[in-house]
Amino acid sequence: MVEFLAGFEGRVIAVYEAGPTGMKLARVARERGIDMRVCAPGLIPRKPTDRIKTDARDAERLVRQLAGGLSFVRVSSEEEEALRDLVRAREDARQDLSRARHRLSKMLLRRGLRYEAGSTWTDRHIDWIVRLKFDDLASRMVVGEYVNAVQQLHRRRKDLEATIEELLPSAPFAQTAYRLRCFRGLATLSAVGLCCEVGDFHRFAKPSQLAAFLGIVPAEYTTDSKRRLGAITKAGSSHARRLLVEAAWHYRRLPATGTTLARRQQDIDPRVVQIAWRAQVRLHKRYTQMKARNKPAGVITIANARELACFCWEAATLD
């Protein structure tokens, strides 16, 4: 494809849709001096009555809209893409581990077996499950398989997390990740995950654009004098959105800087630490006020996640 494009005389502008082929074509073409762009498939304007889809029609539509009707995505570097794949592999392992634990716990629940000696999924809990006695071979095989799956997935997740922390100092966005770790609820893995999914925070002119990119802004239908707001759009990366929502739950507690958070804030620009403290004060106050008005906890957390994204943008883009 690159050789074909390089055969044209003069300046060549090309475009293709973001998809499973990745960004390698764009990177190689740009190295050859070709203006290769990648557009977002979900933002390509289409006529409501257009029910015919072919490769030729798609190509013609992209060319006709290249002058101003397309929204282009950022082409990440090979280093960023490799680390993002590692972070997503860790997320897959986390989800697989959660499913494996769910299967095992529900299997024991059907047998009427409950663990009441402490927290679940600790070494003591797993040892308790292993020591359970079943009369039939089928139950012994099922428990053994489920326990083995949980233990293997737990080791896989720990290995992936250790690799992420090892690679962080040399990552392209290491400085941004260290700044995001200053926020309550955003430890190393969450900060790296946000950086991998968002990329360059500077490409957003204002924090509201970042919130819209992450899909944590309400859907809107406004016509004439009527304005109706719906649920959040859920556009963009679901992984980044989950990380922000999980972090937002921490702001229910009173503002404080514990030992772990203070350790993460060491040797960081004091202005970034001040932004993180303002976030704690602001989001806890917002949670308290909305809770007093009997707002559901989930709604409050989503609202706080949206504001937390804005605080993260401020810290990441600080010069």
Image (cartoon, rainbow, N blue to C red):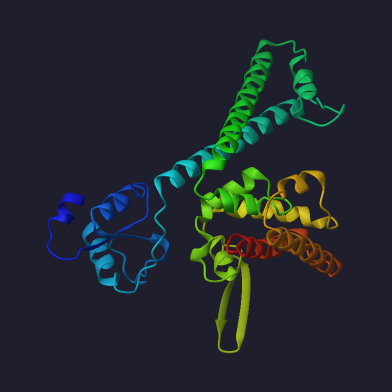
Say whether residue 211 is left or right of residue 118. left
Q: Residue 100 or 217: which is nearer the viewer?
A: 217
Q: Residue at x 86, y 29 (%)?
A: 118
How many numbered circles are shown?
A: 0
Q: Quadrant where the C terminus lies?
A: bottom right
Residue 198 sits above or below residue 117 on the image: below
Say whether residue 4 is left or right of residue 225. left
Residue 306 sits above or below residue 242 on the image: below
Q: Find residue 291 and report its horizontal and vertical position in percent.
A: 83, 65
Q: Residue at x 54, y 69 (%)?
A: 209
Query: Which quarter of the picture shows residue 79?
Result: top left
Say whether residue 287 is left or right of residue 165. right
Residue 169 visible in the current orientation: yes
Query: Which quarter of the picture shows residue 47?
Result: bottom left
Residue 93 visible in the current orientation: no
Q: Find residue 159 and report its horizontal and vertical position in percent.
A: 59, 29
Residue 159 sits above or below residue 82 on the image: above
Q: Find residue 315 and report its horizontal and vertical position in percent.
A: 63, 61
Q: Residue 196 or 268: which is nearer the viewer?
A: 268
Q: Find residue 36 and report its horizontal and vertical position in percent.
A: 28, 59
Q: Residue 259 or 282: which is nearer the viewer?
A: 259
Q: Residue at x 38, y 64 (%)?
A: 72
Residue 100 sits above or below residue 38 on the image: above
